[in-house]
Image: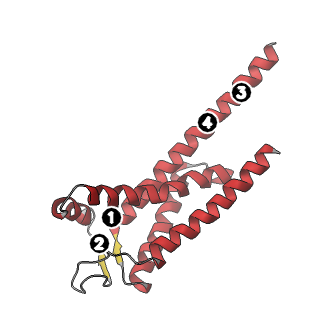
Amino acid sequence: MKYVQQKKWLSVLFILYLLALFYVTLLAWNYGASLGSAAPGGRNYNLIPFRSIYRIAVYSPDMIAPIRILVGNIVMFMPLGFLLPMLFRKFRIVGLVTLIGFVISLFIESSQFLFTHRVANIDDLILNTLGAFLGSLIAMGILKARKRIIVYTTDQKSSL
């Protein structure tokens, strides 16, 4: 019964996460969206890897903004990488979860360019995919540790 209840809470958390992810990336106004030719908030894109990361690092007036932007893009996708393997056995493959993170991030970045006045950025795609990868590594570590604990406690009980 505990497993079913745990799965239910994780499912609710996953749905809330997806709603928040799509709200933040597609609906909420991004005040620092674009400083390109279309002026603040204009439709723009970056297809050169690490270009915006470099620009953020070099041209930011302080170190807080670059850290917040870079870490934020990674952390934003870690729940996806974590919750997929925890909820579904078929997603307990790090490469598969990373690919799903890549595809969802690609969908978001494409949608930002096509339907909103935001910046579609390959660096966001890279950082988001890294976040999904790291989240899946954490989930796999927890699942492996939990399995070892269960096996260890079962072995201890059988030896008594």
Q: Amino acid at mark 4?
A: Lys
Which numbered disc flags the more N-terminal residue, 1 or 2?
Answer: 2
Q: Position of residue 66 (x, y in %)?
A: 27, 59
Q: Amino acid at mark 3?
A: Val
Q: Where is residue 36, by image quadrant?
A: bottom left
Q: Residues within 10 Å of mark 3 (few under 14, many from 20)?
A: few
Q: Residue at x 68, y 50 (%)?
A: 89
The quadrant in which the C terminus is found is: top right
Q: Position of residue 49 (x, y in %)?
A: 28, 64
Give the residue at mark 2: 47
Give the residue at mark 3: 151
Q: Are marks 2 and 4 in contact (CB under 8 Å)?
A: no
Which numbered disc flags the more N-terminal residue, 2 or 3?
Answer: 2
Give the residue at mark 1: 123
- Helix, strand or loop at label 2? It is loop
Q: Amino acid at mark 2?
A: Leu
Q: Where 25 sits versus 147, above or below?
A: below
Q: Residue at x 48, y 79 (%)?
A: 27
Q: Along the line of sight, which residue is nearer the eye, 6 or 63?
A: 63
- Helix, strand or loop at label 4? It is helix
